[in-house]
Image: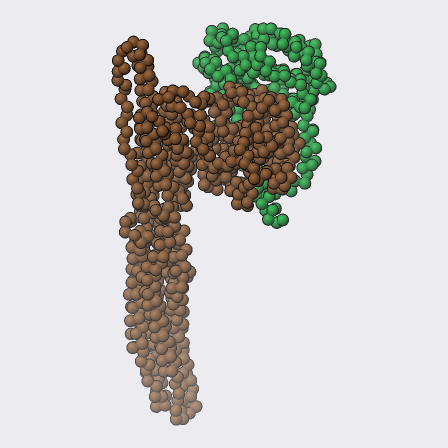
Amino acid sequence: MKYLCLISFSVVFLLGGCVTMNDSNQLQDDQSEIEEVHDRYVNVTDYTGEGYDLPDGEATDPIATEKMTEIEKAVSTFFLEEYKTDVIVHNAVGNADGATVFVQSIGEPQFHTYAMIGIDVEKGDIKAENIWTETNQVEQAIFSGLLVMIMEEEFSELDTFISEIAATHPVVGLREEAINNVKATAYTTPYYFVQPLALRDEMEQITQLYFDNPNISADELRQHFNKESYDAEKLIISISFFMEENEPEPALFDNIVDSFKDVEGVPRANYTLSLHDNKINKQSASGDQNNSLEISDIIK
Amino acid sequence: MTTNVKQAINTTITTDQDLVELAGLHAYLEYGKDQVFEVNEKVYRVRDSYFNEDPTGLDAMTIQNMTSGEYHIVYMGTNVHGKYGTADIVTDVKLLTAPVPAQLEGAEHYFVKMEQKYGEITSVTGNSLGGALANMVGVRHEHVRSVTLNPALLPANAVETDREYENIVNYIGQYDILNLGVSSIGLGNQVPGARHTIYNGIPSTAGIGFNHTGYIREDGKHVSHVTVGTEGAPGYGVIKVDAHYHLVSSIWTGQPLYGGRSERIDLNVETIRLLSDGIETSVLDRLDWAQQYVNHSMEIITHESAVYDARLNQLREIYQESVENIVEDGLLRYIRFGNGMFKQVIQGLHMVVDVIEARCESLNFLLEYPPVALLKFITKKTIDLDAVFAEIRSYLRRLEDQLDEFIAAIDDIVMRKIEDIFKAGQERFHDVVVGELASHFNYVTTNYSNMFDQVKEFGTQVDQVAVAFETIDNRLASAISNQSAVGDVGKIQQTTAVEMIESPYLLNFMALKEQCLNIAMEQFKTGSSFIVLPIATSLKTTVSLIEWSGEQITSVIRTGTNIHLYGNPGNLILSTFTNYDENVKAKVNEILEPMDELNEMLRGVRTGLQKFLTNYPVVVDNLRPYIDSALFNDSGYYNIHIYNSAATSILKDMQLLFDDIVFQLSDHEAEAITVLHDVSSSVKTNMSILEEQIERAATW
């Protein structure tokens, strides 16, 4: 038995990386913690991004909060230098060894994205020289904003459709604060976001034009992008509605889906439509639950 | 030659490398549903995001390769510090028991749910606990491929030990402590499916963490390499450690080459081009890294060679200081400067003897002239100590001479024997560890450079063959339709014969230093003891002789001054005698006082010398770590081992790749391909010779 305990501890240590005895002592309490899982949901109408959590962020999160002013300065300088874009830094959430910083572009192209900044936990300080972004994530975000400029009319049709749904159905979207604080999904509105990374060639060409001239006009961009010929399957637009109250109703969802299928003039894209109840997981900022209704791969 | 491609080359499908990277890196980024991200230039869409939802601690996402359409589930490993991380820990512990823990059941439920929603899932993946979750699915669903990186074991009830599990592939880092541990406690069969060792990571305790996860995150950022050495110091550099970088796959199909070669492809212009591109991008790039590792080792060796004098002098200093400190009261202090404490002590002895002698003379004077009233009653004569003092002085001079010899002996050890340490009993090098390594690396670097050129040349030849085949094909087509001549094709690079030169060095591998250290220690201990201990013994003997002479003086004085009266001197005389007797006694005491001092000093010197004799071998033993470091700087030596382990890993990878290349180029009718086959075969052989040579500087 002693032998098994020893092995157990070693294996747990290896799997967990750095398990303190304290953690092991807490094993007894796991039942109560599991109960808490069900407390992760809050009303989307109240949700502003509080409680958002990333793996291994316990040590870095308080430092990120404390050093917010420095993070803001470092990250906005980084975006201006690397991506020629002015951004507002909305939030910084601790992750393993650093913080994920949520930013929003100022003016056009409009988008939300994120960068990571290093944190020295021992010194309780940020590492301003150590900022990085996930491969092509910011490029995707810029491209999404540029696409919205290029397809102004089409996105306006989409917005109109969504406003009508929101006006005629008991549904709501995310609050602006939640988007700013915890969403990094490129062009993002309370109801949808746009992910065009799979349009690789187009992305490279259009973002390059932007980097060459950050003040480039929508008209000029249009000369380089054929909105009739791109592969619609590769432009992901994900639309989510939350019920004002009650469970998601299949009839109501069908109604929304049917209306959407009928709508014309929206961007040619690969759409996902979801309908959730009024709850959102505050840790992951996701509305997906077992009762969520969803239809994906609607190609317009 | 045939021109049919038997197997479609699909560069869009998700490879094992991609899955390993997804498991080790992207699983922890918690992407949301419909987010699109990139791995190795392939674009993935998150179809389902299941983080922070499950009470069992299960975290996973379902992603779709947007080009190939494949679906994959990526399971996250232990997230201890997450809010619900304790559920992960509970699961980790339960893996060692028989029943299947809830999180593993949850992983399967999730998989079933996703298949219901999206159709067939092509593969599941995960690292560590995530690997166990993926394998749980693989065990229960044969149609899905489970690809893991350093997986945790499954609980006993989950695995049938006699089943093959052909759908499961586990990539295990050569230095992954978890799997080394699991195997060592006999639980290896609880990791189902094939287990392939991949040569990533570094053999260092600093690497325990990232050797297991397969990736390094520094400040939250993924860095593909580990840094070795100190910036600005020789041998400073980086080693690539990403797990997927070391997952060798076919140049043609992208399929991993573990446990078998790629499916035989037909060679045509396109496939030959793929080979030439692969040589350029996959092979030469990696060989270039390995070359850098070898160069860093060489930098360290060159540096050690350049600082030979410094190492030598430092060792001399350390030896001298150790010798001086053997006797705590400082007898040997500053002995290296010729006029140290010992010499001063001898001078002190001289002075004390002078004092004693003077006082003896004074005593003699007293004895020679007793009060007149007593003359006829006393027969006492003067004490004769001249011979004894002459003896003492002669011994003191002998002591001085012997001390000079002793100093010379220490100096001889410092100058000559310490230099011999670096030779460790051989005649080839004045600095054997550095010399042997440097000589070996001269072979390695020359061979490496030749092998590198050979691979480059092979790449050029492959490229030129592709061009020639295409030209001929076009010209033939054109000749057939226009009845024109076929004409010449461009020149093809001639094959240069490349032969690896055998290195006669480092045959004892990196044990070299340890062995040299043992030899050097033994020789130095015996050699220096032989020089210094006899002289120290003589010194001690001389001191004893002086002590004995001292005793003689005391004894002579005591017996000589034991004055008795005879006859009847009467009361008057008695009082005169008493006064006289007291005067003699006072004089004797005046002599005995410095005598005590002399004895004290001599005892001190003798004890000190005895300490030297007893402790000298211990002191030499204690020099071991200093000698070890002087033979070759410890961290530099260790870094050579690490760099060469990394270079060996790359050569192992490249041989696996070339094994497939040789196989694909074998048994073809076309002569050109036969030539390429021979060259590739020679490259592979040369790589294995080099691997062996480099491994000599990697095997601890």
- Residue B230 % position (x, y): 41, 38
- Residue A176 % position (x, y): 63, 17
**Residue B292 in sight from this viewpoint:** no
Q: A216 or B456: which is nearer to us?
A: B456
**Residue B470 in sight from this viewpoint:** yes
Q: Residue furthest right?
A: A246
- Residue A3 % position (x, y): 59, 48
Q: Quadrant of residue B520?
A: bottom left
Q: A127 or A221: which is nearer to us?
A: A221
Q: What residue do we see at 40% from left, 93% from top?
A: B568
**Chain B colour?**
brown
Q: Quadrant of residue B268?
A: top left
- Residue A73 % position (x, y): 52, 23
Badge count:
0
Q: What residue do we see at 41% from left, 55% from top?
A: B622
Quadrant (top left/top right/bottom left/bottom right) for the C terminus of chain B:
top left
Indicate how the structure is coloured in the image.
Answer: by chain
Q: What residue do we see at 39% from left, 87% from top?
A: B564
Q: Is residue B261 above or below residue A148?
A: below
Q: Tell which chain the image draws in green.
A: A
Q: Is residue B452 above or below residue B537?
A: above
